[in-house]
Amino acid sequence: MTAKKPKTLEESIIEAMDGSDLDLIPFLPYILQDRWEIGSDPKTMIDLIRKHARDHSDLKILDLGCGKGAISIKIAHKFKCKCFGIDAIKDFIDEANLKAKEYQVGHLCHFEVGDIREKVKSLQGFNVIILGSIGPVFGDYSQTLQALKACVADGGIIMIDDGYIANDNDYLHLLVQRKDVIDQQVLDSGMELIDELVFNKEDIKQSDSAIYENLEKRCLELIKKFPEKAALFKDYIQRQKEENVALEDEITCAVMVIKNKFQL
């Protein structure tokens, strides 16, 4: 059986952003210019760190697929701890650095452009690792946790903001796994799910609506500017509509807190 070819960095980016065409990548900063928090909710991550970590000012945070840095910056501002964010889109990292200065945490936050799949191979000693709504960049949960194990300090946690299909739901999605599959993959990796915060559907709908309104507006502007690429932007608008319906009606959205099961 032929091994599955790994995704390119560009393929991982477009998948994480719920797109389908690599030609969209250069336009993502424009499309998402109205939104600083383009991934997970920083308050949720802060609350979970407060609950599951100690000595907050001494923490080392690794934010993978950090986007524009909202999570790292707000964590650093709250706990006065060091945060390291990595994202593949340079414009996002540039904005993250500007925001860090604005929030007066530039000395605590370091942001870098790169492929997180490669960067993690040389990182270690982080108390908290965050994957905020970036999808299966490393593969399934077993592959993801195996890739991150060496990066986690003793007693550290991994927080993954993701969506899954409930075990009693027949809905199918190419990128979303069932809850029982996730639980087994976590255990197979030698780790354990110690906490889970499930998002309220009404809150998801309100957030999706605000994001979609601006996204559609920017895509329509790009259609006027680049009429020859109209199909590209219309496809992205349609995919966002479909993804929002799935998130609001079929998929359970949650932040899962995972820890080495021998360190509980």
Image (spheres, rainbow, N blue to C red):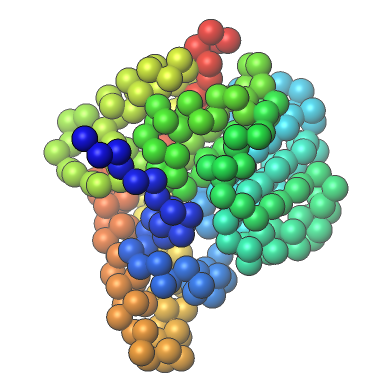
In the displayed structure, 76 sits above or below 97; it is: above
Residue 198 image offset from top left, x and y in percent:
41, 35
**Residue 17: in sight, yes or no?**
no
Residue 53, by quadrant, is: top right
Q: Residue furthest left?
A: 170
Q: Left or right? Give the position of 195 relative to 37.
A: left
**Residue 139: in sight, yes or no?**
yes
Q: Residue at the location (30% across, 73% down)?
A: 235
In the displayed structure, 233 sits above or below 50; it is: below
Residue 161 image offset from top left, x and y in percent:
47, 40
In the displayed structure, 48 sits above or below 92; it is: above
Residue 96 image offset from top left, x and y in percent:
69, 58
Residue 31 image offset from top left, x and y in percent:
49, 73
Q: Left or right? Give the position of 201 relative to 8.
A: left
> In terms of depth relative to the viewer, which is nearer, 131 or 14?
14
Q: Residue at the location (51% across, 72% down)?
A: 26
Q: Residue at the location (58% across, 10% down)?
A: 263
Q: Residue furthest front?
A: 2
Residue 128, by quadrant, is: top right
> In terms of depth relative to the viewer, which is nearer, 191 or 49?
191
Quadrant where the N terminus is found in the figure:
top left
